[in-house]
């Protein structure tokens, strides 16, 4: 039976739109997570790529309240097959394209680059929702919401999901996890986090609100995926609720689903 797949991405996740280059080459949306070591294995600024899903998806019988599986995604990648993905990026996401004009991504970033820790390549579905987070000054004089959590939705034709995690780097330990949809309106929900340990489930701490005009601490990591000399633009914090999300067609505004809206916002890149 066909089902709906929802993947919720939270933290330092760069959505990179890759348009078709010709017949037989589908549109792809890559979600790449830049390496953020942060000065040591136990540093508060170190980012961990983590997959979370309810263990009920392992047998497809019923959700198991409060019991989730956690899979470390470091050095792994996943490709969601299909005939083409939407390249739409919701307006409450900071788009790096105007900032980096003339400075395309470093070659290999969408493949096996050592600059990224994890990659998802989506060849099916579209961005359907987000939690728009706090209010930031992204361009001078403009205060706006910038999302830190995004939902991707794909309609799947099969009865289960073969989540084949392949090695992105030699250190990666490939694995395949078979997940089954739940509910009378069948659905599989995955969470993909790329955040510091203190912001990860199941015991994410209370995020500390920045000072006025303080720059988003970790956002600059995205520019490590671009060549030296690329301009760097980082959001400056303004407030929690003093601006209105833009929303947009097909971009549902979601309730707060965890994660820090102050350090690890997602970003978009639609090409040079």
Image: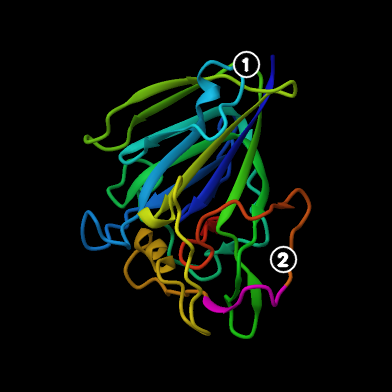
**Residue 51 drawn in magenta:** no
Element type at marker 2?
loop
Dot 2: few (<14), some (14–19), or many (≥20) neighbours within 10 Å?
Answer: some
Q: Is residue 37 visible?
A: yes
Q: Residue at x 41, y 35 (%)?
A: 70
User: Magenta segment range?
Assistant: 236-243
| 258 w.r.t. 95: above or below | above
Q: For the image shown, how many numbered marks are present on the structure?
A: 2
Question: Disc 2 vs disc 1: Cβ atoms closer than 8 Å?
Answer: no
Q: Residue at x 63, y 85 (%)?
A: 141
Asked whether 118 or 82 is in front, the reply is: 118
Question: Which circle's residue, 2 or 1, is located before the other in the chain?
Answer: 1
Asked whether 250 or 3 is in front, the reply is: 3
Kindly report which numbered mark, 2 or 1, lies closer to the viewer in this rendering: 2
Q: CA–CA distance between discs 2 and 1?
A: 35 Å
Q: Which residue is mark 1?
A: 158
State the image coordinates of residue 168 (x, y, percent, origin top left).
32, 36
Q: Which residue is mark 2?
A: 245
Dot 1: few (<14), some (14–19), or many (≥20) neighbours within 10 Å?
Answer: few
Q: Is residue 196 visible?
A: no
State the image coordinates of residue 113 (x, y, percent, origin top left).
31, 46
Say left or right for 63 vs 52.
right
Say left or right for 115 vs 32.
left
Q: Residue at x 60, y 69 (%)?
A: 134
* Quarter location, residue 50: top left
Element type at marker 1?
loop
Say left or right for 164 vs 167.
right
**Residue 238 drawn in magenta:** yes
Asked whether 227 or 257 is in front, the reply is: 257
């Amino acid at each position: 039976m066909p089902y709906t797949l929802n993947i919720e991405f939270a933290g330092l996740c760069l959505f990179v739109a890759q348009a078709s280059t010709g017949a037989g080459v589908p549109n792809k949306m890559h979600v790449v997570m830049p390496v953020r070591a942060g000065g040591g294995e136990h540093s508060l600024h170190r980012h961990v790529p983590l997959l979370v899903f309810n263990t009920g998806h392992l047998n497809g019988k019923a959700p198991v309240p409060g019991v989730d599986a956690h899979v470390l995604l470091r050095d792994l990648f996943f490709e969601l097959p299909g005939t083409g993905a939407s390249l739409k990026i919701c307006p409450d996401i900071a788009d790096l394209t105007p900032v980096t004009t003339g400075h395309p991504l470093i070659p290999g970033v969408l493949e096996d680059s050592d600059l990224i820790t994890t990659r998802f390549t989506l060849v099916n579905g579209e961005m359907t929702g987000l939690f728009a987070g706090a209010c930031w000054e992204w361009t001078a004089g403009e205060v706006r919401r910038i999302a830190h959590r995004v939902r991707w939705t794909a309609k799947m034709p099969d009865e289960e999901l073969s989540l084949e995690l392949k090695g992105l780097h030699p250190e990666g330990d490939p694995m395949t996890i078979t997940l089954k949809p739940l509910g009378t309106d069948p659905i599989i929900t995955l969470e993909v986090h790329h955040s510091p340990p203190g912001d990860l489930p199941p015991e994410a701490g209370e995020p500390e609100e920045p000072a006025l005009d303080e720059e988003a601490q970790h956002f600059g990591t995205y520019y490590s995926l671009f060549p030296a000399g690329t301009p760097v633009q980082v959001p400056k914090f303004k407030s929690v609720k003093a601006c209105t999300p833009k929303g947009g067609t097909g971009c549902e505004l979601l309730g707060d689903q965890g994660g820090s809206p102050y350090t690890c916002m997602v970003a978009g890149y639609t090409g040079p």
